[in-house]
Amino acid sequence: MKRLAIVILLLVLAVLAAGTAVVLDLLAYAAAPAKEAAEAEVVAVSPGEPFSTVAGRLFERELIVMPQKFRRYARLRGFDKQVKAGEYELSAAMAPRKILSTLVEGKVRLRRLTIPEGYDLVQIAAAAAAAGLGSEEEFLAKAYDEALARKMGIEAKDFEGYLFPETYYFPRNISPEQMIAAMVERFRSVFSPQWRRRAEQIGLSVHEIVTLASIIEKETGAAEERPLIASVFHNRLAKGMRLESDPTVIYGIESFDGNLTRKHLRTHTAYNTYRIRGMPPGPIASPGRASLEAALFPAESPYLYFVSKKDGTHHFSATFQEHRSAVRKYQLGR
């Protein structure tokens, strides 16, 4: 019996030693990169993809060696069923344990999306598609979804004007709704409670301020002119005059070809501020912080008119006679 006990003990020790050796070997493997130096590569993992397929792709791309050991190490850690779908930037210079933790923690590659000030929904959708973040059609379907706008607290028929111009970083598989939510949240972080109170003080709703700011944004050539341009529109509104803003007319033209004509100015649309009084029904683009601030805090001026000097700036006038002279000088060259 004593000899049998010794044999059993020796067998147990041998098994433990073998198991320890296997674990140590896997740990050593996990700590050793496939290459000392290598460029990062983009690797995509699809939803529900088997871990063996992922390991095989990493091996084919020469990001790891010995895929069997990679799978065994993942099973040892309990990570083989925890890999998250997405795009990843991985390198052969990364240790296998680092590659695995990146996949498990979902440290996906982010795509850069820059929305310039003054972009409208169609332009934003095109920018998102160009960044590889879905199709324009899918984005616009959500951007023009009134029910979704109401759900996110936007009191408008769509998200025009409320997708704040900024640089965003999104994963490839993000949904249009998630992108829109992030842009709306950024708008809310900029449009502070103090600004909401200011809007009330000057007798305008948040929607009206965003609408006016979008017009200021599209009219502005030189940043420092925003408060003056805002003053012209505020002065016109106070006198019951039409805003007569070309960008609003253009926004209301379907398939605008770049040539604004007298016929366009005479054609009645909801956005033609040469024909309607007051502001159009909603924003015509996404205004930036400076244009929103100008709409809320316009300069004090007597001006009712402005005309482009064709150098990015404008000539401002208090009377129609002065405005006509400026038009002749700067637009007609007389």
Image: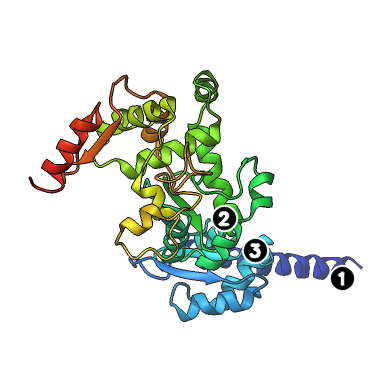
For residue 20, the mark is 3
Q: Alpha-carbon distance for marks 1 and 3?
A: 24 Å
Q: Residue at x 68, y 72 (%)?
A: 48
> Quick one: label 1, few (<14), some, or many (20+) residues within 10 Å?
few
> Quick one: label 2, few (<14), some, or many (20+) residues within 10 Å?
many
Point out the frontmost of discs 1 and 3: 3
Which amino acid is tagged 3?
Thr
* 292 up-or-down from 202: above or below: below
Q: Alpha-carbon distance for marks 2 and 1?
A: 77 Å
Q: Position of residue 145 (x, y in %)?
A: 63, 55
Which residue does the numbered mark 1 point to in the structure image? 4
Pick the residue in front: 280 or 294: 280
| Quadrant of res 315 | top left
Which residue does the numbered mark 2 point to in the structure image? 143
Which colour style is shown? rainbow
Which amino acid is tagged 2?
Ala
